Image (cartoon, helix red, strand yellow):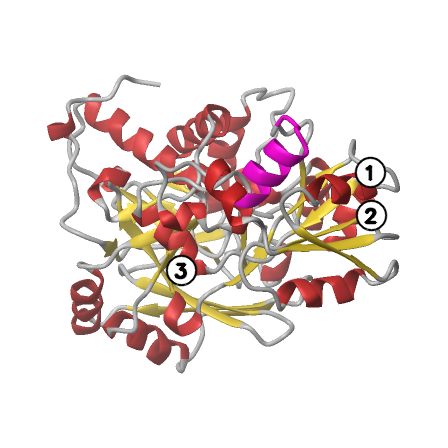
Amino acid sequence: MSSAPPASAVPVPPGLVLAPFRALRYDPGVVPDLAAVLSPPYDVIDDAQRAALAASSEHNAVRLILPVGTDEQPDRYATATALLAEWQATGVLRRDEVPALYVYEETEPGGHVQRGLLGGVGLAEAEAGIVLPHENTMAGPVADRLALLTATATDLEPIFLVYDGGGAASTAVEQAAAGDALVDVTTADGVRHRLFRITDPDTLADVAADLLPRTATIADGHHRYATYLQHQRDQHAAGRGDGPWDRGLALLVDVSRSGPAVHPIHRVIASLPVDRAAELAGAAFRVTRLRDDAADAALERLAGTHGPAFVLTNGAASYLLDSPDERVLTEVLPADRSAAFRSLDVTVAHLLLVDRLWGLRDHEDVVGFEHDVPAAIAAAGAGGTALLLKPTPVEDVAAVARAGERMPRKSTLFTPKPRSGMVLRPHDDG
């Protein structure tokens, strides 16, 4: 990566800016089955899923976001660039004629509706207090995404931002969603995806004025946002000045109107038997043995607790941990961290349970992660422990971000995630 230019060389937006753009989209006349070409975000796709998505259509977006080299072209980033050019040349992807903000609505099978605005978010470091991260990033994924962005000069998939709105932008989203959709498709997971656009200048001006004083938190896409920032620095260091690299494709969702559902990410300690885990936890928690076959009931009990609480289970034996010793909490939780960070269940799980009571190294080869309970129990096996958590409220995530801090890794799962392939943002004219 290039060294960063002087801070003064990189522009800082005056506030939260979401710029209209001319989206590159699949042409339904050429690609009538849009469900077959949309893809989950790159970072939730394993090798088997990537193969299945690619097999579902020769035009699936996974071929762009997770490109694979060929004998003729071993450079996979060059493969993505060539494919992107080919799809535009053959009409698979077509450019919208006028700039717009796009309203993206996702309806999950249970009826939960999420709506947000797709646009080019003005980039700013966390210190500016405009777009706030809540997790740390790793160099490897950023380097990978940067190579892909540099090669394609296109934002291939959006990051996911949340904010507390309720103003003109939210009203514009709801009004647009009452009109005719550009896209209306249901993917194999049962989620219905609809896309609308806002082009009216007065409405766009109202949205811009409403968003400007607000703050957004990154719900998903920390590595992609870090990539945006590095790409911006690289372009300015190369003397290219202001340009489309000063913005990055983002979905901005108002949590006060139609925000995401937040789910916990459970922990798995395969090396620690559940009975032993419960015994050790008793040094600081009230431990209640639950019915041996009641993982679902255990989750119901967990949802009804106040303060830090967890369930330990291996699928056969389950324990509820609650009412932690305040004295021990005070000893364990770092005094130099914010109250928001100290109050997180996931913080207590790692610092009190894993580190202090279980005496384990908090590393990925010791503590695993699973998004759902059956997978966590299966990963724990009969000789291990699945540590089940409550979801972290969105407002708690935002509070930690506002404090300038980061949550423990894999703390939250926001759903539904925006599908890749709904819109692409080329950098040729912003």
Q: Magenta stretch: residue 270 in it?
A: no
Element marked by disc 2: loop
Quadrant assignment for the N terminus:
top left
> Residue beneath label 3, please?
395
- How crowded pointer 2 is (Cα within 10 Å; few <14, some 14-19, many 20+) is rated as many
Say if the magenta span includes residue 355.
yes
Residue type at the position of mark 3: Glu
**Can residue 323 be seen?**
yes
For badge 2, the amino acid type reads Asn
Mark 2, residue position: 314
Instruction: Kindly report the distance in space between the C-alpha atoms of the residues bearing marks 1 and 3.
Output: 34 Å
Res 148 → quadrant: top left
Residues at marks 1 and 2 touching, judged by CB atoms closer than 8 Å = yes
Residue 84: image location, x then y, percent: 47, 40
Q: Is residue 64 above or below residue 365?
A: below
Along the viewing direction, whichever of 256 and 174 lies nearer the viewer: 256
Numbered tag placed on residue 324 in the rendering: none
Secondary structure of the magenta portion, mostly? helix
Q: Residue at x 70, y 62 (%)?
A: 299
Query: Residue 273 shows which numbered tag?
Result: 1
